[in-house]
Protein backbone atom coordinates (compact mmCIF):
# COMPACT_ATOMS: atom_id res chain seq x y z
CA UNK A 1 0.00 0.00 0.00
CA UNK A 2 2.85 2.33 0.89
CA UNK A 3 4.42 1.73 -2.51
CA UNK A 4 1.15 2.26 -4.36
CA UNK A 5 0.47 5.54 -2.58
CA UNK A 6 3.88 7.04 -1.87
CA UNK A 7 5.94 5.67 -4.76
CA UNK A 8 3.46 5.15 -7.60
CA UNK A 9 1.32 8.08 -6.37
CA UNK A 10 -1.99 6.24 -6.71
CA UNK A 11 -5.15 7.99 -5.45
CA UNK A 12 -6.42 6.41 -2.21
CA UNK A 13 -9.70 5.56 -3.97
CA UNK A 14 -7.88 3.39 -6.55
CA UNK A 15 -5.84 1.69 -3.84
CA UNK A 16 -9.10 0.92 -2.03
CA UNK A 17 -10.58 -0.69 -5.16
CA UNK A 18 -7.44 -2.72 -5.79
CA UNK A 19 -7.20 -3.96 -2.21
CA UNK A 20 -10.98 -4.37 -1.92
CA UNK A 21 -11.22 -2.17 1.11
CA UNK A 22 -12.50 1.30 2.00
CA UNK A 23 -10.72 4.60 1.44
CA UNK A 24 -10.85 5.19 5.19
CA UNK A 25 -9.08 1.89 5.80
CA UNK A 26 -6.44 2.85 3.22
CA UNK A 27 -5.72 6.13 5.02
CA UNK A 28 -5.59 4.42 8.39
CA UNK A 29 -3.29 1.60 7.23
CA UNK A 30 -1.09 4.09 5.43
CA UNK A 31 -0.68 6.15 8.59
CA UNK A 32 0.51 3.09 10.48
CA UNK A 33 2.81 2.04 7.64
CA UNK A 34 4.43 5.46 7.45
CA UNK A 35 4.94 5.46 11.21
CA UNK A 36 6.54 2.01 11.03
CA UNK A 37 8.89 3.13 8.26
CA UNK A 38 9.72 6.28 10.22
CA UNK A 39 10.60 4.20 13.29
CA UNK A 40 12.91 2.08 11.16
CA UNK A 41 14.98 5.07 10.06
CA UNK A 42 18.55 4.97 11.30
CA UNK A 43 19.63 7.61 13.76
CA UNK A 44 21.02 10.34 11.53
CA UNK A 45 22.27 12.53 14.34
CA UNK A 46 25.80 13.57 13.40
CA UNK A 47 28.47 11.95 15.51
CA UNK A 48 32.20 12.30 15.65
CA UNK A 49 34.39 9.92 13.63
CA UNK A 50 35.53 6.90 15.64
CA UNK A 51 39.14 6.25 16.57
CA UNK A 52 39.32 3.75 13.72
CA UNK A 53 37.94 6.36 11.30
CA UNK A 54 40.61 8.83 12.42
CA UNK A 55 43.39 6.29 12.03
CA UNK A 56 42.31 5.41 8.51
CA UNK A 57 41.99 9.09 7.66
CA UNK A 58 45.48 9.76 9.03
CA UNK A 59 46.89 6.92 6.92
CA UNK A 60 45.01 8.25 3.87
CA UNK A 61 46.44 11.75 4.33
CA UNK A 62 49.89 10.34 5.02
CA UNK A 63 49.79 8.33 1.78
CA UNK A 64 48.83 11.46 -0.16
CA UNK A 65 51.52 13.58 1.48
CA UNK A 66 54.18 10.98 0.67
CA UNK A 67 52.85 10.49 -2.88
CA UNK A 68 52.45 6.85 -1.95
CA UNK A 69 49.88 5.52 -4.40
CA UNK A 70 50.46 1.91 -3.31
CA UNK A 71 49.97 2.84 0.33
CA UNK A 72 46.76 4.64 -0.54
CA UNK A 73 45.37 1.81 -2.64
CA UNK A 74 46.17 -0.63 0.18
CA UNK A 75 43.69 1.27 2.36
CA UNK A 76 40.83 0.60 -0.07
CA UNK A 77 38.34 -2.21 0.22
CA UNK A 78 37.99 -4.46 -2.81
CA UNK A 79 34.56 -2.93 -3.48
CA UNK A 80 35.60 0.65 -2.73
CA UNK A 81 34.05 3.36 -4.86
CA UNK A 82 35.17 6.85 -5.76
CA UNK A 83 32.69 9.44 -6.92
CA UNK A 84 32.72 13.15 -7.54
CA UNK A 85 29.19 14.54 -7.47
CA UNK A 86 27.73 16.25 -9.41
CA UNK A 87 30.15 15.10 -12.10
CA UNK A 88 29.43 11.88 -13.95
CA UNK A 89 32.45 10.17 -12.50
CA UNK A 90 32.07 6.91 -10.64
CA UNK A 91 34.48 4.07 -10.31
CA UNK A 92 34.73 0.91 -8.33
CA UNK A 93 37.64 -1.16 -7.14
CA UNK A 94 41.25 -0.33 -6.18
CA UNK A 95 42.61 -0.99 -9.69
CA UNK A 96 40.34 1.56 -11.40
CA UNK A 97 40.75 4.10 -8.60
CA UNK A 98 44.53 3.73 -8.77
CA UNK A 99 44.54 4.16 -12.55
CA UNK A 100 42.35 7.25 -12.32
CA UNK A 101 44.41 8.87 -9.54
CA UNK A 102 47.58 8.48 -11.55
CA UNK A 103 45.93 9.80 -14.71
CA UNK A 104 44.27 12.72 -12.90
CA UNK A 105 47.56 13.66 -11.21
CA UNK A 106 45.81 13.55 -7.86
CA UNK A 107 49.12 13.66 -6.02
CA UNK A 108 51.47 16.52 -5.36
CA UNK A 109 51.23 20.23 -4.62
CA UNK A 110 48.52 19.63 -2.03
CA UNK A 111 47.93 20.33 1.62
CA UNK A 112 45.48 18.39 3.77
CA UNK A 113 43.42 19.38 6.79
CA UNK A 114 41.57 16.51 8.51
CA UNK A 115 37.96 17.39 9.32
CA UNK A 116 34.68 15.66 10.11
CA UNK A 117 31.70 15.84 7.76
CA UNK A 118 28.37 14.76 9.29
CA UNK A 119 30.18 12.29 11.47
CA UNK A 120 32.31 10.86 8.68
CA UNK A 121 36.07 11.28 8.48
CA UNK A 122 36.93 13.81 5.81
CA UNK A 123 39.77 15.94 4.61
CA UNK A 124 39.89 19.46 3.21
CA UNK A 125 42.33 19.62 0.33
CA UNK A 126 44.19 22.80 -0.60
CA UNK A 127 46.04 22.86 -3.88
CA UNK A 128 48.90 25.13 -4.86
CA UNK A 129 48.21 26.31 -8.36
CA UNK A 130 51.28 28.51 -8.84
CA UNK A 131 54.85 27.90 -7.82
CA UNK A 132 55.39 29.56 -4.44
CA UNK A 133 51.80 30.80 -4.34
CA UNK A 134 49.21 30.30 -1.62
CA UNK A 135 47.40 26.99 -1.47
CA UNK A 136 43.79 27.46 -2.55
CA UNK A 137 40.74 25.64 -1.28
CA UNK A 138 40.24 22.84 -3.76
CA UNK A 139 38.11 19.92 -2.57
CA UNK A 140 36.44 18.23 0.37
CA UNK A 141 36.93 14.47 0.40
CA UNK A 142 34.59 12.46 2.61
CA UNK A 143 35.54 8.88 3.43
CA UNK A 144 33.37 5.95 4.40
CA UNK A 145 35.35 3.56 6.57
CA UNK A 146 34.14 -0.02 6.84
CA UNK A 147 36.03 -2.57 8.87
CA UNK A 148 39.17 -0.49 9.05
CA UNK A 149 39.38 0.18 5.34
CA UNK A 150 37.97 2.76 2.96
CA UNK A 151 34.69 1.74 1.34
CA UNK A 152 33.99 5.01 -0.43
CA UNK A 153 35.62 8.32 -1.28
CA UNK A 154 33.19 11.11 -2.06
CA UNK A 155 34.99 14.07 -3.60
CA UNK A 156 33.38 17.51 -3.72
CA UNK A 157 35.30 19.97 -5.88
CA UNK A 158 33.57 22.90 -4.25
CA UNK A 159 35.79 25.50 -2.52
CA UNK A 160 32.68 27.29 -1.22
CA UNK A 161 32.14 24.36 1.16
CA UNK A 162 35.26 25.27 3.14
CA UNK A 163 33.47 28.10 4.89
CA UNK A 164 30.94 25.62 6.31
CA UNK A 165 33.80 23.85 8.04
CA UNK A 166 35.27 27.11 9.38
CA UNK A 167 38.24 26.81 7.04
CA UNK A 168 39.90 29.68 5.17
CA UNK A 169 39.69 29.84 1.37
CA UNK A 170 43.48 29.83 1.11
CA UNK A 171 46.51 29.05 3.20
CA UNK A 172 49.45 31.41 3.65
CA UNK A 173 52.23 30.72 1.18
CA UNK A 174 54.99 28.60 2.65
CA UNK A 175 58.38 30.21 2.68
CA UNK B 1 -0.91 -14.54 2.89
CA UNK B 2 -3.78 -12.15 3.31
CA UNK B 3 -6.75 -14.22 4.43
CA UNK B 4 -10.05 -13.25 2.95
CA UNK B 5 -8.66 -10.88 0.36
CA UNK B 6 -8.94 -13.06 -2.78
CA UNK B 7 -12.34 -14.30 -1.68
CA UNK B 8 -14.49 -11.87 -3.62
CA UNK B 9 -12.07 -11.72 -6.51
CA UNK B 10 -12.27 -15.49 -6.94
CA UNK B 11 -16.02 -15.30 -7.14
CA UNK B 12 -16.09 -13.00 -10.16
CA UNK B 13 -15.36 -14.12 -13.67
CA UNK B 14 -11.62 -13.98 -14.26
CA UNK B 15 -9.89 -12.55 -17.33
CA UNK B 16 -6.78 -14.49 -18.29
CA UNK B 17 -3.89 -12.21 -19.17
CA UNK B 18 -0.71 -13.51 -20.80
CA UNK B 19 2.21 -11.69 -19.20
CA UNK B 20 4.99 -14.00 -20.44
CA UNK B 21 6.30 -11.15 -22.62
CA UNK B 22 6.88 -8.93 -19.59
CA UNK B 23 10.60 -9.65 -19.29
CA UNK B 24 12.21 -8.28 -17.28
CA UNK B 25 9.35 -7.17 -15.08
CA UNK B 26 9.77 -3.88 -13.25
CA UNK B 27 7.72 -1.58 -11.05
CA UNK B 28 6.27 0.13 -14.14
CA UNK B 29 4.91 -3.20 -15.33
CA UNK B 30 3.38 -3.93 -11.93
CA UNK B 31 1.87 -0.45 -11.89
CA UNK B 32 0.23 -1.07 -15.28
CA UNK B 33 -1.06 -4.51 -14.27
CA UNK B 34 -2.44 -3.18 -11.00
CA UNK B 35 -4.22 -0.38 -12.85
CA UNK B 36 -5.72 -2.96 -15.21
CA UNK B 37 -6.90 -4.89 -12.17
CA UNK B 38 -8.61 -1.79 -10.81
CA UNK B 39 -10.36 -1.24 -14.14
CA UNK B 40 -11.40 -4.90 -14.25
CA UNK B 41 -12.72 -4.68 -10.69
CA UNK B 42 -14.82 -1.65 -11.55
CA UNK B 43 -16.31 -3.68 -14.43
CA UNK B 44 -17.07 -6.55 -12.08
CA UNK B 45 -14.28 -8.74 -13.40
CA UNK B 46 -10.79 -9.68 -12.26
CA UNK B 47 -7.46 -10.44 -13.89
CA UNK B 48 -5.49 -13.63 -13.56
CA UNK B 49 -1.91 -13.54 -14.81
CA UNK B 50 -0.58 -16.35 -16.94
CA UNK B 51 3.02 -17.17 -17.81
CA UNK B 52 4.57 -14.75 -15.31
CA UNK B 53 8.34 -14.87 -15.63
CA UNK B 54 11.31 -12.52 -15.64
CA UNK B 55 11.10 -11.81 -11.93
CA UNK B 56 7.44 -10.79 -11.93
CA UNK B 57 6.34 -13.38 -9.33
CA UNK B 58 9.19 -12.36 -7.03
CA UNK B 59 8.46 -8.66 -7.54
CA UNK B 60 4.76 -9.14 -6.74
CA UNK B 61 5.69 -11.05 -3.62
CA UNK B 62 8.15 -8.36 -2.58
CA UNK B 63 5.48 -5.69 -3.06
CA UNK B 64 2.86 -7.73 -1.20
CA UNK B 65 0.60 -7.80 -4.26
CA UNK B 66 0.39 -11.55 -4.92
CA UNK B 67 -3.12 -11.65 -3.46
CA UNK B 68 -4.13 -8.70 -5.59
CA UNK B 69 -2.66 -9.88 -8.89
CA UNK B 70 -3.11 -13.65 -8.73
CA UNK B 71 -0.75 -15.82 -10.75
CA UNK B 72 -1.81 -18.92 -12.62
CA UNK B 73 0.97 -21.47 -12.20
CA UNK B 74 -0.49 -23.86 -14.76
CA UNK B 75 1.90 -22.68 -17.48
CA UNK B 76 5.45 -21.77 -16.56
CA UNK B 77 7.24 -20.13 -19.49
CA UNK B 78 10.62 -20.32 -17.75
CA UNK B 79 10.37 -24.10 -17.55
CA UNK B 80 8.96 -24.23 -21.08
CA UNK B 81 11.86 -22.16 -22.46
CA UNK B 82 14.50 -24.32 -20.84
CA UNK B 83 12.75 -27.45 -22.14
CA UNK B 84 12.42 -26.04 -25.66
CA UNK B 85 16.13 -25.28 -25.87
CA UNK B 86 16.83 -28.98 -26.39
CA UNK B 87 14.94 -28.86 -29.72
CA UNK B 88 17.09 -26.34 -31.34
Image (cartoon, coloured by chain):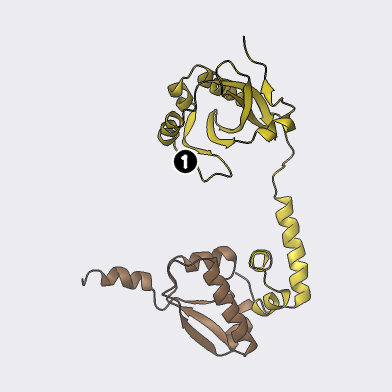
Chain colours: A yellow, B brown
Quadrant of residue A161 in the image? top right
A50 vs B73: above or below: above
Which residue occupies 52% across, 46% down? A88
**Left or right position of A131 against A36:** left
- The reply, left or right, for residue A102 in relation to residue B70 is left
Q: At numbered mark 1, what does the secondary structure look like: helix, strand or loop?
A: strand
Q: Is residue A51 visible?
A: no
* Closer to us: B70 or A13: A13
Task: Specify few, some or many for label 1: CA neighbours under 10 Å numbering under 14, 14-19, or 20 or more.
Answer: some
Is residue B80 visible in the rendered image? The answer is yes
Number of numbered discs? 1
Q: Which residue is located at x 49 percent, y 68 percent?
A: B57
Location of residue B3 in the rendering, given as x and y in whole percent from the top left corner: 63, 74
Quadrant (top left/top right/bottom left/bottom right) for the C terminus of chain B: bottom left
Subunit of mark 1? A
| Residue under label 1 | A91
Image coords of residue B71 (percent x, y): 49, 76
Q: Quarter-wise, where is residue B87 in the image?
A: bottom left
Q: Return the x and y of residue A170 as percentages of the image width and height.
A: 67, 23
Q: What is the quadrant of the N terminus of chain B in the image?
A: bottom right
- Based on the displayed image, in which of its 4 quarters is residue A60 positioned? top right
Image vertical order of residue B3 relative to residue A95, above or below = below
Between A125 and A30, the one lying in front of the other is: A125
Amino acid sequence: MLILRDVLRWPAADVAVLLETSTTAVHSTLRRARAAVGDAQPDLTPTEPSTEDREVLAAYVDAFERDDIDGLVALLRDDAILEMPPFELWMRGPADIRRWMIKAEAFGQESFTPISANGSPAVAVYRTLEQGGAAQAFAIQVLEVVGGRIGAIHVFLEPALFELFGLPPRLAAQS
Amino acid sequence: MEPGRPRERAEVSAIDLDVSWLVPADLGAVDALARLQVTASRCGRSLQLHGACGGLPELLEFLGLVGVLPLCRCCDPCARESGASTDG
